[in-house]
Image (cartoon, grey):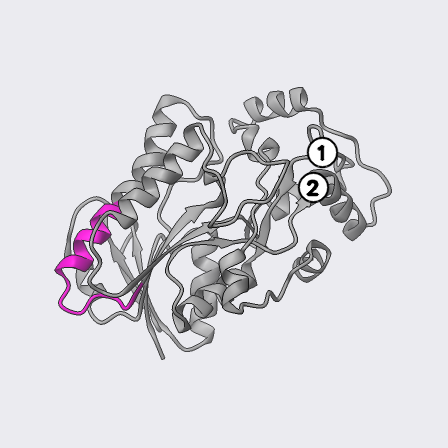
Amino acid sequence: MGNIVIAGGNGFIGRALVKRSLEEGDRVTILTRGRESKEGMVRELHWDGQTLGDWAQALEGADMLINLAGKSVDCRYNAKNKRAILDSRVEPTRVLGEAVQRAERPPKLWINASTATIYRHAEDRPMDEETGEIGEGFSVDVATSWEKAFFEQSYPGGRRVALRSAIVLGKEGGVFKPFWTLVRMGLGGVQGNGRQIFSWVHEDDLFRIIRFIQAGTLEGVVNVSSPGPISNRELMATFRKALHMPFGLPLPGWLIAVGAWIARTEPELLLKSRWVVPTKLLKAGYRFQHSTLGEALTSLA
């Protein structure tokens, strides 16, 4: 039985991690902006993600702290949303740093969310932790500020790991259902020029990777992505095959831009090429449960 604290544990990824942690017999404390509650082995404590409070006591003696706090990037990047996206990541990371430094028995491991979007748009070669090139633009600025807030503070507890996660595929959220719906509607053709690389990880592997990190010695930045990234053209073909759809109308870049504006989101989410490989995990001996997209879609469907 372990003792795990998850900040931002009520989101799509957080709910999946909580469910699996409970299945393994762990006690879970969720730091939430909602009401406090306790049910079985799950306790929810209120925090504002900005200031120290009674919630900090939950960190005492914890085996692992996982920080997933952050506003969804599925929105228009206007000035208000940009500030909220940045602050909702940097401020919780900063205040958690204050809390662990004050703790008498800080968590043995602190895992902080980050994003594979930190790397540049890449159609020429894959990006790993050693040779990957940091990109430019708002999303990259958020990622670098996030990681800076995480690593610039001293950490007396032991190891820290920033998960540069690719797009997570899961049943209860993320991009799986929207893609599935597009394909069923006959709109599962190439998006943009189709050459952009889609890096992904199955939610099962995400949890197993966290456990692998907990049991090992990895620290620093770690790419969390399947070793089988594919082009957008291959991505949509795999979705069509899984749904037995014989065709899919293409969505050119200009139409995606119009659709993103209507849906109040950003075309970057579909058009940026994220070619990410998990070099550190593979070298450390991790073996993916879902290494091909076809297999992953079958398990989710």
**In the displayed structure, does residue 267 sit left or right of residue 14?**
right
Look at the image and say whether residue 101 sits in the magenta stretch.
yes
Residue 90 position, x and y percent, is 29, 41
- Contact between marks 2 and 1 (CB within 8 A): the answer is yes
Dot 2: what SS?
strand
Q: Nearer the viewer, residue 156 or 178?
A: 156
Question: Which residue does the numbered mark 2 point to in the structure image?
Answer: 231
Identity of the residue drawn at 64% across and 40% down: 197
In this rendering, would 274 be left or right of 244? Answer: left
Range of magenta residues: 92-109
**Left or right, residue 21 beside residue 35:** right
The kind of residue tagged 1 is Gly
Q: Quadrant of the C terminus?
A: bottom right
Relative height, residue 150 to residue 194 (above, below):
below
Q: At 36% across and 22% down in the image, what residue appears?
A: 79
Q: Amino acid at mark 2?
A: Ser
Instruction: Give the spatial CA distance, label 2 vs label 1.
Output: 7 Å
* Magenta stretch secondary structure, dominant: helix
On the image, the x and y values in percent for residue 66 come to 35, 59
Residue 212 or residue 40, whichever sits in front: 212
On the image, which quarter does residue 297 sit in? Answer: bottom right
Residue lying furthest right in this view?
A: 246
Was residue 171 drawn as part of the magenta stretch in this picture?
A: no
Q: Residue 194: which numbered mark, if any?
A: 1
Q: Position of residue 118 (x, y in %)?
A: 45, 39
Number of numbered callouts drawn = 2
Residue count near mark 2 (Cα–Cα under 10 Å), binned few <14, some 14–19, many ≥20: many
Closer to the N terminus: mark 2 or mark 1? 1
What residue sits 79% from the left and 31% below the top?
249
| Residue drawn at x 74%, y 43% as measured from the top left | 234
